Image (tube, helix red, strand yellow):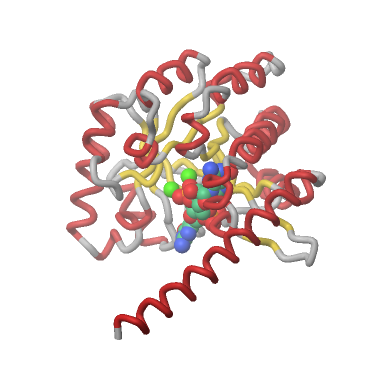
Amino acid sequence: AGGNRMQIFSDDMRVEVRERIAAENRLREALAGDLTETLPIWWQPIVAADTGLVVGAEALVRMCTPQGDILGPGHFVPAAEETGLIVPLGEHVLRRAVIRLLEWTDHLDYVSVNVSPRQLAEPDFVPMLANLLAAHPALDPSRLVLEITETALLSSSVDVRERLETLKGLGVRIALDDFGTGYSSLTWLQSVPADVVKLDRSFVAGLSADPRKASIIQAVLWLARSLGMSVVAEGVEDPADWHALRELDCPSCQGYLFGKPMPPAAFAAFLQPAANR
Ligand code: C2E
Ligand code: CA
Ligand code: CA
């Protein structure tokens, strides 16, 4: 049995290695192409909970393959992290975010960009962002929000707190992504100078029917408020959950109920009604 197990394990590994190499090659190819075509950014609305009106958008990267398939980040972001290709990929996303912020100034307050642990640890990350902001003096940097996950705190060799302070010095805001799913969420709250908490979907979905979830959210909202942080509830799909979040005075919501991630043209069309507010 031991022998068989070894055989199966090594087959799995071979498949895994082959997939990893394929993912890496696809990514290199995409990064060598016209990035707006090969790695388009899709935009998902973030709304004010009381009115349902758009206040911001999260940038979510996609990959268009030469075969015409559109891949979600799960298919290439992990490979990008491992190979370091997340650095050029992440820079591309930030550049697009700045351009869209300026373009959509009248329609939304902020844009939120995911920053992976590897990107954050990169010594060039802060100078790159500083240069980008300096190149766009018309942009108020507080309109750019960087979303960081707890793994950045755990896995990184650099002093994350110090790095985040430096980033805040540039005027950008920091959000704690997937809040509540990690092992040290309270440490995270205590030690990191964040402006926004993004409450993970696992606490939000089904909240209206689950008093325990409601209690947890209420406590996080209270905690965030006393620390001067805002809150975005992620993964709102059900009108009853939205209603419950409004009752709890949650400031903002994100989820399929308000809009799925959309390509820029569709998102711009989606934003139009907000021009009349
Ligand atoms: P995330 O940062 O937690 O992003 C939210 C994910 O939840 C997105 O998936 C979004 O489409 C999905 N979502 C939003 N509302 C709902 C909802 O109501 N129900 C459900 N079931 N799902 C919802 P997506 O676009 O596939 O992105 C997955 C992850 O990939 C992101 O999770 C983020 O960690 C990562 N990612 C995306 N773009 C980037 C990027 O530019 N850079 C980096 N480093 N990571 C990225
Ligand atoms: Ca995010
Ligand atoms: Ca999230």
Up-down: is 169 above or below 209? above
Where residue 225 appears, as percent x and y from the top left, is: 27, 30
Left or right: 210 with respect to 140?
A: left
**Foreground: 160 or 100?**
160
Q: Quadrant of residue 134?
A: top right
**Quadrant of residue 163 in the image?**
top left
Give the total number of marks visible in the rendering: 0
Residue shown at 57% from the left, 23% from the top? 124
Residue 185 drawn at (x, y percent): 25, 40
Residue closest to the far front: 3
Q: Is residue 53 visible?
A: no
Q: Is residue 42 visible?
A: yes
| Residue at 36% in and 37% down | 197
Q: Measured from the top left, where is residue 174 in percent x and y?
A: 44, 29
Residue at x 33%, y 44% (from the top left corner):
179
Residue 51 appears at what percent x and percent y?
Answer: 47, 43
- Using the image as rendered, state which of residue 6 and residue 266 is in the foreground: 6
On screen, residue 260 above or below 68: above
Query: Which of these two is toward me, 242 or 226?
Result: 226
Side (left or right) of 36 relative to 93 = right
Residue 65, by quadrant, is: bottom right
